[in-house]
Image (spheres, rainbow, N blue to C red):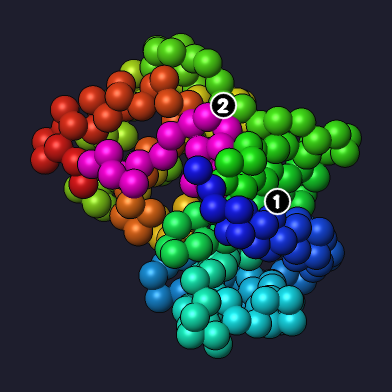
Amino acid sequence: MVDESVRQAAEARLQVARDVIAPRMRDLTLRWFQSLELRSERKADGSIVTPVDREGEDLIRSILAREFPGDAILGEERGSSPPSDPASRWRWVLDPIDGTGSFVRGLPHWVLLIGIEHDQQPVAGVIDAPALNETLFAHRGGGAWWTLRSGQTRPARVSTVETIDRAMIEIGPARYFANGGRGDVHARVIHAARRTRGWSDGHAFALLASGRVDAALNFGFHRWDLSAPAIIIREAGGRITDWDERDDLDAPTMIASNGLLHQQLMGLVRSSPGGGA
């Protein structure tokens, strides 16, 4: 059961995420999307970043400083900021552009991720896809919702596919798995699934939560990649765990599924040399 005060506070934060932050971020990112003047560089970990990523996180932080000044913030670009109110149990977990590689290449498969946590647990979240004009959002106990490009909002539900040989699965690049010593997992999933695709992770999680793909897995995650998708997938009826089947959103590995496929995917991971990650 969700505590009523926590529910109300989560809904208030979710409203700001949807109605204030997401529209402002759309305006910013779409000004630069497919622009010939957009520049990018590599961070120390090899990932791509643009000035828009950093400007976007600064914009979100400025809104939160006004709306919820006591809350903590964890962002991909600016790191962790402790709560100004020592008694606060709230934290925002941000990725201003998840899928920067797609953003830089002019592909539409990038998203804004806003996770809202209470006592280190996701209680609300938004996945907004500006170039596709779609939004998914949820709060704990309130279900998951999908706003389509038409403007219609309807419940978001995972698929009902029951076997991997009938499933469409989003999976990350083989290189990520090989670099982590788990290349065999990638090969097993590719051969077991009916079809596989390789969208950016946040977009793949949105597709899963709305029933358009049946599972998603990858190697090399961070908290900001998972906080928002986790609550949306769970409220949509799906399941998300690490490769040891733990509810650990700080683990580098993750399997997200419609729930019906989860044990089959765990079997593919566990049958590989070394078992779980």
Q: Are marks 1 and 2 in contact (CB under 8 Å)?
A: no
Q: In this figure, which residue is indicated by the disc labeled 2?
A: 158
Q: Nearer the viewer, residue 238 or 88?
A: 88
**Amino acid at dot 2:** Val
Query: How far across and how far down the image is residue 77, in percent?
Result: 54, 75
Q: Position of residue 260 (x, y in %)?
A: 41, 20
Residue at (73%, 76%) from the top-left corner?
67
85 is higher (above) or lower (below) than 49: below
Above or below for 100 versus 238: below
Label 2: few (<14), some (14–19) or many (≥20) C-alpha neighbours in 10 Å: many
| Picture disc at residue 209 | none
Dot 1: element = strand
Give the residue type that dot 1 points to: Asp
What residue is shown at x 80% (from left), y 65% (from top)? 20
Q: Is residue 149 magenta?
A: no
Q: Secondary structure at mark 2?
A: loop
- Label 1 sits on residue: 128
Q: Residue at x 49, y 14 (%)?
A: 161
Q: Residue furthest right?
A: 150
Tell me residue 141's x, y (percent).
Answer: 58, 41
